[in-house]
Amino acid sequence: MNALRNNVKLIGRLGAQPEIVNFESGRSLARFTLATNERYKDKNGQWKDLTQWHNINAWGKTAERIQKALSKGQEIMLEGRLVNQSYESKTGEKRYSTIVELTDFLMLAPTKAEN
């Protein structure tokens, strides 16, 4: 039952080329944004599109796989967990953000350049 507690699954497209950071410890981090889209009808019966942007982080071997396999515009399905972060801005204001820490992904469609 523990696997159900903090589990996120998303399908979307990469908003930019993944950024790879290699640390002195030998550990790797891949960061990218993922756009998910929803369609709905408004009160007038008109179709509306709603795009949500998600910040994604992946560590270790998964980051290395991302570096080799993924590029901007590619459609993927991912699984991960939500991680809340807090930091202080340059003006001293406390800020919060939520990221998805990716545990696995599946490529669904090639990028437009590959078609």
Image (cartoon, rainbow, N blue to C red):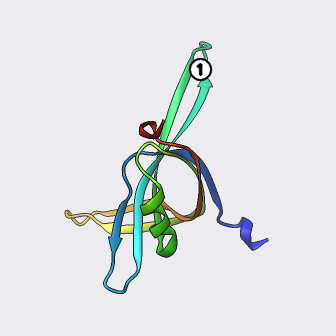
Secondary element type, mark 1: loop
Q: Is 64 or 6 nearer to us in this picture?
A: 64
The reply to whether residue 49 is in sight is yes
The residue pinned by badge 1 equals 42
| Residue 106 percent coordinates (x, y) | 60, 55
| Residue 7 percent coordinates (x, y) | 65, 62
Q: Is 22 or 89 nearer to us in this picture?
A: 22
The reply to whether residue 98 is in sight is no
- State left or right for residue 105 relative to residue 59: right
Q: Residue at x 47, y 75 (%)?
A: 60
Instruction: Check disc 1 and give the amino acid type.
Output: Asp
Please tell me whether residue 85 is drawn above or below residue 114 in the rendered image. Answer: below
Please tell me whether residue 41 is drawn above or below residue 82 in the rendered image. Answer: above
Q: Residue at x 56, y 49 (%)?
A: 76
- State left or right for residue 17 relative to residue 70: left
Q: How packed is label 1: few (under 14 Cα within 10 Å), some, or many (20 or more)?
A: few
Q: Residue at x 38, y 83 (%)?
A: 26
